[in-house]
Image: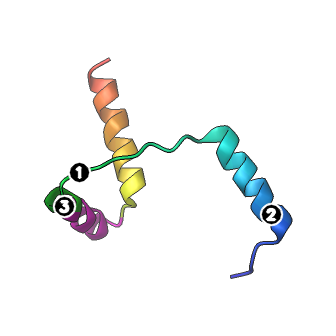
Amino acid sequence: MVALSDAQKKANEKYLKNNYKQVKLSMPKAEAEALEEYCTSKKYTKAGFIRQAIKEKMEREP
């Protein structure tokens, strides 16, 4: 893996700032551990799984 240059880091930060918004999520430890185990077993990222679950819920209940 090649290290990013300062210019690449700055460009990545600018892209993220302009195109993404972070959403904080807190949950009980037991639920967080269950989520971690599930995502690991299915080879999902937690963020990707949560985004997909939200998208599916919103499509079912417009």
Distance CA(mark 2)–CA(mark 1): 34 Å
Give yes or no for residue 34 being in the magenta stretch. Answer: yes
Residue type for callout 1? Met
Which residue corresponds to the image point at 34% horizontal and 47% vertical from the top-left?
25
Q: Which colour scheme is used?
A: rainbow
* Mark positioned earlier in the residue sequence (3 or 2): 2
Helix, strand or loop: magenta stretch? helix
* Above-or-below relation of 14 to 59: below
Measured as percent of width and height from the top left, residue 10 is found at 79, 58
Which callout, 2 or 1, points to the residue nearer the camera? 1
Q: Mark 3 = which residue?
A: 29
Residue type for callout 3? Lys
Q: Mark 1 = which residue?
A: 27
Q: Residues within 10 Å of mark 3 (few under 14, many from 20)?
A: few
Which residue corresponds to the image point at 68% horizontal and 82% vertical from the top-left?
1
Distance CA(mark 3)–CA(mark 2): 36 Å
Q: Residue furthest top?
A: 62
Q: Mark 2 = which residue?
A: 8
Check the picture and name the quadrant holding the C terminus. top left
Measured as percent of width and height from the top left, residue 2 is found at 74, 80
